[in-house]
Image: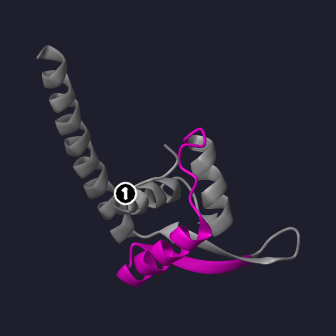
Amino acid sequence: MKKQSIEHTQLLVLSLLASRDIYGYEMIVELARRSQNVFEMKEGTLYPVLHAMEKAGTVAAYEQTAPTGRTRKYYRLTQKGRGCLADEKAAWARYADAVNAVLRTEALS
């Protein structure tokens, strides 16, 4: 299983940004690393999500020059984004609990 569900992409991005500001490609690498390569997000998936989140006010972007001299666009979590992350984590926990309850019920049959 190498794909993340599109509806959970925002939760993954918010989680990455919870600890520090990150630029786009670094998010892709970090998500793959943290998930042991289960989630391999493509740029074509990530950037539209980031732009939508920026428009919604859950993330903010700024440019910064890297040590290599390249200018990178970094993203940071806003206060609204922190609230959204808490809500999405709670929704995910409810969803995971419900799936596990069904799986346990199946095992008892």
Q: Which element carries disc 1, helix, strand or loop? A: helix
Task: Name the residue: 60% across, 69% down.
Answer: 43
Residue 25 in the image, given as x and y percentages of width and height: 67, 64
Q: Quadrant of residue 102?
A: top left
Left or right: 43 as drawn, with respect to 80: right
Q: Nearer the viewer, residue 56 or 77?
A: 56
Left or right: 61 as drawn, with respect to 107: right
Residue 98 in the image, given as x and y percentages of width and height: 17, 38
Left or right: 20 as drawn, with respect to 93: right
Task: Name the residue: 39% across, 62% down.
Answer: 6
Kind of residue at disc 1: His
Q: Is residue 55 magenta?
A: yes
Left or right: 72 as drawn, with respect to 11: right
Task: Name the residue: 59% across, 38% down.
Answer: 36
Residue 63 in the image, given as x and y percentages of width and height: 67, 80
Q: Nearer the viewer, residue 22 or 1?
A: 1
In the rendered structure, which segment of residues is drawn in magenta? Answer: 35-64
Name of the residue lying farthest toward the top: 108
Q: Nearer the viewer, residue 56 or 108?
A: 108
Disc 1 marks which residue? Answer: 8
Answer above or below: position of 44 versus 18.
below
Q: Is residue 81 magenta?
A: no
Task: Name the residue: 62% across, 68% down.
Answer: 24
Q: Quadrant of residue 8?
A: bottom left
Residue 33 in the image, given as x and y percentages of width and height: 63, 44
The colour scheme of the drawn protein is one colour
Q: Quadrant of residue 86?
A: bottom left
Answer above or below: position of 90 versus 74.
above
